[in-house]
Image (cartoon, rainbow, N blue to C red):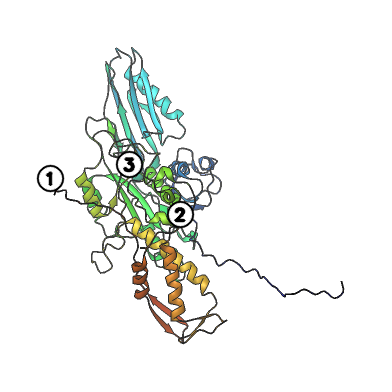
């Protein structure tokens, strides 16, 4: 081309964006029982990325506990990775409930309504004709129940007039399945459901988490009676070295208030974990009510599954969550790390029935449960929808036995965890290849000292107080408080920077107490 003159000499170089490292995507693990062993399914087998095309039916059995939990999760979201550990309950005792019909013949047409496991999904209505007998009613319900291939009970006729429901799930968790018979039919009667055999013996859980290695689950749905296996897995991960591995397990049981708050559950030392959320439902078997189960006529494991699914959806960036929040604030209609600091109480559970009439905890009982470390699922004041109450963890005392509110609520854990993960990921990126000095930094070289480290931590704190994160307190005073709390010690021989700082996280508005003084004269 000959001599080319190109002046002035201009160069624009492109560099990668100095973008922050986001927190890890949500992953949830469900641990539940199967009753049909599909390909690759065995006791404690680990299955990743469960799809939304009904594969759980062939893998685990359509009417299994595990399949029901997967369906409940997918109703909330199919945008969060869902893995499972399948447990074999075949060696456990299955729960049996009998419903006995009596009388002679129906003298007027009317309905009996049976709930076998779920008010929303497994509610059966039989219109008894004039002349119907206890035997014909029993046979009709056997046909209805067995035609529902998802039902967690199978049905059979015993002694002509007894409807026998046998749970497809074994162990004590089957006690959380509601059974109800309602209706008035002239000439006939239905006795209260009678549990003739209690589910007992849990599937073995020891060693089940060994196979997952370093896979992190922010949420684990736990169905077994004893939480020791899951807390023994999660608790050491709360402050894992050189990585962020923490997560929270969700367990729901229905029982009496004294059992929930006493040594049976929450007063037991094993229920003192910032990695465990325990949802307490009321045992509502009242004589003459025709009902046996929790205050909400849904399986206990579905309650914990749905809440865990909603939490994972709320913490996933940019997903629409308007149906799972009560606030109308525009930015809170989409998921992301900032939702960790939004209260979990008043969270709607749209795929959950509401407590039946006369069922559920009183205000005083709710306070006792909260003090003991239990959350609840109840209803809004109008009684029109199921919502979450306050969600504490079971953590109550530190290692020395002192009362400690640091990790009392799930919001505290999620907020602090989200902030910690952001600090961890971005500090790891920023100082991936830095020299260390106790003196001044050298211009044009990657050299870190106390001033540089402190300035970067302050920058990250300001990110966390921004609308994107909203995890720590905002404003000049808060930033100054954080900055002044930072203490950095540098050990040149080992190349170690030890940092201590105070992190003022956001909490939740739980109580408003006001006094209104009556007055009459406004002209003063």
The residue that appears at 50% across and 61% down in the rendered structure is 22
Q: Are marks 2 and 3 in contact (CB under 8 Å)?
A: no
* Residue ranking furthest to the front: 524
Residue 178 point in image, percent of width and height = 33, 36
SS for tag 1? loop
Q: Are marks 2 and 1 in contact (CB under 8 Å)?
A: no
For disc 3, the marked residue is 175
Of tags 3 and 1, which is closer to the observer? Answer: 1
For disc 1, the marked residue is 521
How much space separates mark 2 and mark 1, taking CA atoms?
50 Å
SS for tag 2? loop
Q: In the displayed structure, would residue 11 be above or below residue 321?
A: below
State the residue in front, 471 or 397.
471
Q: Which mark is residue 336?
A: 2
Q: Which mark is residue 91?
A: none
Count every numbered label the image shows and give the total: 3
How much space separates mark 3 and mark 1, taking CA atoms?
62 Å
The tag earlier along the polypeptide, 3 or 1, is: 3
The tag earlier along the polypeptide, 2 or 1, is: 2
Of tags 2 and 3, which is closer to the observer? Answer: 2
Q: In the displayed structure, would residue 456 be above or below residue 321?
A: below
Of tags 2 and 1, which is closer to the observer? Answer: 1
Residue 476 point in image, percent of width and height = 36, 68
How much space separates mark 2 and mark 3, taking CA atoms?
36 Å
SS for tag 3? helix
């Amino acid at each position: 081309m000959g001599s080319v003159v190109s002046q002035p000499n201009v160069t624009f170089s492109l560099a990668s964006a100095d973008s922050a490292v986001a927190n890890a995507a949500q992953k949830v693990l469900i641990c539940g029982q199967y009753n049909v062993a599909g390909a690759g399914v065995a006791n404690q087998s680990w299955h990743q990325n469960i799809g939304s095309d009904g594969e759980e039916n062939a893998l685990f059995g359509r009417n299994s506990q595990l399949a029901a939990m997967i369906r409940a999760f997918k109703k909330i979201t199919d945008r969060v990775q869902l893995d499972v550990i399948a447990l074999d309950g075949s060696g456990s005792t299955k729960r049996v409930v009998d419903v006995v019909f009596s009388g002679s013949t129906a003298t007027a047409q009317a309905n009996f309504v049976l709930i076998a496991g779920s008010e929303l999904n497994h509610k059966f209505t039989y219109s008894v004709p004039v002349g119907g007998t206890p035997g014909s009613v029993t046979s009709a319900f056997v046909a209805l129940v067995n035609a529902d291939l998802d039902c967690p009970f199978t049905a059979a006729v015993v002694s002509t007039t007894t409807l026998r429901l046998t749970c497809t799930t074994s162990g004590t968790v089957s006690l959380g399945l509601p059974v109800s018979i309602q209706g008035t039919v002239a000439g006939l009667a239905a006795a209260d459901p009678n549990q003739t055999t209690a589910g007992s013996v849990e599937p073995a859980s020891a060693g089940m988490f060994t196979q997952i290695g370093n896979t992190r689950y922010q949420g684990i749905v736990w169905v077994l009676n004893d939480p020791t296996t899951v807390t023994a897995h999660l608790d050491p991960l709360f402050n894992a070295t050189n990585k962020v591995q923490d997560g929270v397990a969700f367990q729901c049981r229905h029982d009496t208030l004294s059992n929930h708050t006493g040594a049976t559950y929450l007063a037991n030392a094993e229920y003192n974990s910032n990695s465990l959320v325990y949802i307490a439902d009321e045992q509502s078997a009242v004589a003459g009510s025709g009902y046996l189960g929790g205050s909400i006529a849904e399986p206990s494991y579905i309650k914990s599954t749905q809440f865990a699914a909603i939490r994972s959806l709320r913490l996933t960036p940019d997903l629409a969550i308007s149906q799972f929040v009560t606030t109308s604030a525009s930015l809170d209609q989409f998921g992301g790390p900032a939702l960790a600091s939004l209260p979990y109480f008043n969270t709607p559970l749209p795929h959950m029935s509401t407590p039946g009439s006369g069922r559920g905890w009183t205000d005083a009982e709710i306070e006792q449960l909260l003090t003991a470390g239990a959350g609840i699922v109840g209803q809004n004041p109008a009684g029109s929808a199921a919502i979450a109450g306050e969600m504490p963890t079971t953590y109550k005392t530190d290692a020395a036995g002192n009362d400690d509110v640091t990790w009392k609520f799930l919001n505290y854990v999620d907020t602090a965890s989200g902030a910690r993960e952001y600090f961890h990921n971005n500090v790891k990126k920023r100082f991936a290849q830095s020299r260390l000095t106790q003196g001044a930094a050298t211009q044009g070289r990657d050299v870190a000292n106390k001033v540089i480290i402190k300035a970067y931590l302050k920058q990250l704190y300001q990110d966390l107080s921004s609308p994107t994160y909203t995890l720590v307190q905002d404003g000049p005073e808060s930033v100054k408080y954080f900055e002044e709390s930072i203490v950095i010690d540098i050990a040149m021989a080992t190349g170690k920077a030890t940092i201590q700082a105070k992190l003022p996280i956001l909490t939740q508005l739980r109580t408003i107490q006001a006094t209104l003084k009556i007055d009459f004269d406004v002209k003063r």
